[in-house]
Amino acid sequence: MAEQYTYAVSRIHAREIDLLSSADMEQLLSSADYGEAMSYLRGKGYGAGAEYSDFEPMIKDEADKMWALIRELIPETEPFETLLRQTDFQNLKAAIKAVYTSEEAADCLESGGSVDPELIVEAVKLKNYGELPDFMAETAESATEIFLKTGDGQECDIAVDRACLETILREGEESGVGVIRDYARLLAALTDIKIAVRAAHTGKTKGFAERALVPCPGLDVSALADAASKNIDEVYKCLEHTDYRDAVEALKISMSEFEKWSDNKIMELIRGQKANPFTIAPVFAYVLAKINETKAVRIVLSGKKNDLDMGLVRERIRDLYV
């Protein structure tokens, strides 16, 4: 297995030179218009060599290429599926609401998860939850019942989002890989902070915050829930006594700035994995780097397409892996 990882890591290091750099991102930002930005990406090998009129299919094809490479290098891709859980559970929320309201499921479902979105819709529609993977089946049933009994979409979302984070944390611990475990813990903490801030801004109760927050290393979620039920300044005070005290400055600017700060924290976590050739860690880091890159590309291209101020767009760009 060590030999397999050594080969996989060497292949990944060869691919790292194709990741977009800060200079590439600056070139995108400086492009005259949307068409020129798309042309620049095609020149960098983005997508599947097709002529794209919209950036979403290009980004999807780029992600598909990345996952095809990972499956080629490491057939047992279970450790990487932790990165797909947010899409899987997002599709579960969309499926429940689409089945039991007038929403069109196709307009809400996302590609790129580990579970076929149509399978999720059919399982919810037929209440045949056993067709779903073990990590999702019980949540699908309980969240559907919550929605049917209460008609409250937000309570349904809380149940699914909580299950998503708990799944990511469990899979991170079970992976036996330090960087996957640390990523799961970091993601859970950052998500809890976001939930607490939004709860404080919208005047939610302590009970609401306690249902929404997921216990994770590095945060006292009981104290955070109590702070969120009071006001945003109490949330800031609570965070000052944690490893996430630096988040406060970003939060005081905007939630968008905090999300950028969060993504940069994840990049900071994975950069140290490059020189670790005997484990799966550098490959996992590459996948996260690619996901972060496509987020940045989407932000720039969306701004270009909608004629937004590139100065404001530039402020939202995350740090890149290379």
Image (cartoon, grey):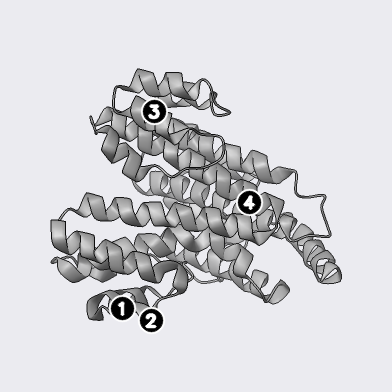
Q: Give the crowd class for mark 1: few <14, some 14-19, many >=20 residues within 10 Å.
A: many
Pick whichever of labels 3 and 1 is earlier in the sequence: 1
Q: Position of residue 84 (x, y in %)?
A: 50, 62
For residue 40, what is the image quadrant? bottom right
List the residue tagged with mark 3. Answer: 254
Q: CA distance from mark 3 to mark 1?
A: 39 Å
Mark 4 secondary-structure assignment:
helix
| Secondary structure beneath label 2 | helix
Who is closer to the viewer here, 155 or 274? 155
Badge 3 crowding class, 10 Å Cα cut-off, few under 14, some 14 to 19, many 20 or more, is few
Measuring from the top left, give residue 309's x and y in whole percent.
Answer: 39, 34
N-term mark: 2 or 3: 2
Image quarter (top left, top right, bottom left or bottom right) of the N terminus: bottom right
- Residue at the spot 58% in from the left edge and 28% down from the top edge: 243
Report the amino acid beneath label 2. Glu
- Depth check, mark 3 against mark 4: the one in front is 4
Amino acid type of the residue tagged 4 in the rendering? Arg
120, above or below 218, in the image: below
Amino acid type at image mark 1: Ala
C-alpha span from label 2 to label 4: 28 Å
What kind of element bears circle 3? loop
Is residue 305 toward the left or the right of residue 32 in the image? left
**Looking at the picture, how far across and down is residue 136, in whole percent?**
41, 68
Q: Quadrant of the C terminus?
A: top right
Q: Are marks 2 and 3 in contact (CB under 8 Å)?
A: no
Is 255 rendered above or below residue 289? above
